[in-house]
Image: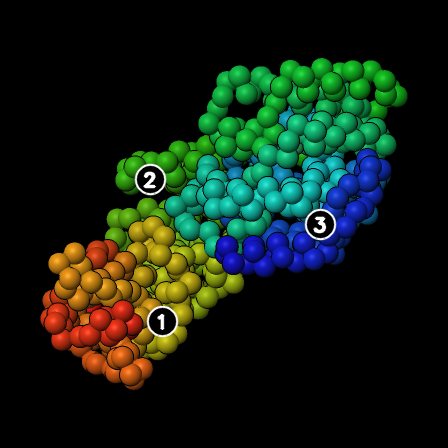
Amino acid sequence: MVKKQLLLWTMFVLLAGCAVNPVTGKNELSLVSEQQELAIGEEQYAPARQSQGGDYVVDHELTAYVSLVGQKLAAVSDRTLPYEFKVINSSVPNAWALPGGKISINRGLLTELQSEAELAAVLGHEIVHAAARHGAQSMSKGMLLQAGAAGAALATQGTSYANLAQMGAGLGAQLITQKYGRDAERESDFYGMQYMVRAGYDPQGAVNLQRTFVKLSEGKQQDWMTGLFASHPPSQERVQNNIKLAATMPKGGEMGIARYRAKIAHLLKTKPAYEAYDEGRKALTKDETATAGRLAQQAIALEPKEALFYGLMGDVEQEKQRLKPALQQYYKATQLNPDFFYYYLQRGKVEEQLQLNIQAQSDLERSVGILPTADAYNSLGNLAQRAGRLNEAKAYYVKVGSEGELGEKAYGALVDLDLKDNPAKYIEVRAGQDAQGRIVVQISNPTPRDIDRIVLILQARNAAGKVQKLRHNLKGTVTAGSQKIFDLGLTGKLTQEQIKTLQAGIVGAQVAR
Ligand SMILES: [Zn+2]
């Protein structure tokens, strides 16, 4: 992932230039071309949504409505972009925009809003972030690169999938969790209200919205702090700015209170189901499987069309080692929502345990196609290894990386498979003289396996310039994650010139049994 970002960065530098901001009309440094903005939005939109909980698909009319309001605002904005608006299936109150006009709002924010004008205020604000190139500017300034891995880790906080290593959402994760800075926020509030008025809304909606945010931030609910408020700090100043601006704007715009209530009626009615689900997820992370199961059933009774609830039920069954019932729950989940990575991943892992190899392979590949995760790559590696497709297994384990518990597992499996063929890739050797003048080598073993039967090639030049090579077997084990010094027993046998030019390379090693 790091490598990929560096590559992108190089691209930006090459294309450096100045451009007029389509919203503010100001001239500014721009290292990201419009073409790149569009490409980033296009590439990152789907994985970013998946990593936040996937799309909310139970009530298609609601998504259509949010999209309609969004497109109405987009049509009067200062920049034509391929705008899209989606509702994410997460209770965390949040909304975000990717470059190129790819915008999302969470289910958990929709239930806090009181009117269509407030919804327009949220979407208008996000439209400005995209139209005024705020994300692209952060990239130009290199702010995202500095955020690095921290940004990716943040993105899954507060979601139910925080424990899954996200691999496909690196740049997108940074873009949707970044702080744009006060100027960008002020700009988004200001122009967002202009778009509201142009689209026929009462700008009072933006005032009400900021008031609600301030009130909620005083309560400091955990969900809010990890969601919207992390990237959009609310303040009394923003309320005041909006009040002042609204006073200068034409009256007679629409609030759309009744229409908004009607559109979110189903979501409001089923809110207790999602609350039970969220509690159930928390219970499961604390290993309270009985409570989690009861809450999942409660959620299903209140909203039988929601796939997430069957996903939780599947996780509960899996936790209880009831693998076949778990499969049935995941199957129901994929029937209700075939587009969320999580159910395929979980089903694939259970099938892997049940040795249903073909099904597992197909489900895990499908999950990776939607959102790549270390979990899926690790299981795919295990399957390939079991089938004797060792090169394929190695390739999957490499993709898992070496971070975290899963990374260590996969790294260990990779060392088991590959150490014999490529020992120098995993352990290091340095040759030299110790304080007593003995000729020694230091072996570093950063892997999670104990390693022995290490074979070295020693190479040195004599006074005549002739290179001599010597094969040398080391006796003893270098334990996982440690270093060890070996006396080569050559003291007194080499000339000063040979010692000075001594080099060692590793040509053989095995995992200790
Ligand atoms: Zn903002």
Q: Amino acid at mark 3?
A: Leu
The x and y percentages for residue 328 are 38, 57
Q: Specify whether residue 451 is in view.
A: yes
The x and y percentages for residue 325 are 32, 55
- Which residue carries the number 2 mark? 285
Measured in 3D between alpha carbons, the distance from the residue under mark 3 to the one under mark 1, in whole angstroms, is: 40 Å
Asked if disc 2 is less than 8 Å from ligand 1, the answer is no
Q: Quick one: SS at disc 2? A: helix
Q: Nearer the viewer, residue 59 or 14?
A: 14
- Which residue carries the number 3 mark? 31
Q: Residue at x 61, y 29 (%)?
A: 232
Q: Specify whether residue 357 is in view.
A: no
Q: Quick one: SS at disc 1? A: helix
Q: Earlier in the sequence, mark 3 or mark 2?
A: 3
User: Hey, which residue is sitting farthest front in the picture?
Assistant: 463
Of tags 3 and 2, which is closer to the observer? Answer: 3
Q: Quick one: SS at disc 3? A: loop
Image height of 43 relative to 63, above or below: below
Q: Earlier in the sequence, mark 2 or mark 1?
A: 2
Q: Amino acid at mark 2?
A: Thr
Q: How is the image coloured?
A: rainbow
- Which residue carries the number 1 mark? 393
Q: Residue at x 67, y 17 (%)?
A: 237
Of tags 3 and 1, which is closer to the observer? Answer: 3
Q: Residue at x 53, y 42 (%)?
A: 147
Q: Quadrant of ligand 1?
A: top right
Q: Nearer the viewer, residue 453 or 472?
A: 472
The x and y percentages for residue 486 are 15, 64
Measured in 3D between alpha carbons, the distance from the residue under mark 2 to the one under mark 1, in whole angstroms, is: 30 Å
Measured in 3D between alpha carbons, the distance from the residue under mark 3 to the one under mark 2, in whole angstroms, is: 43 Å
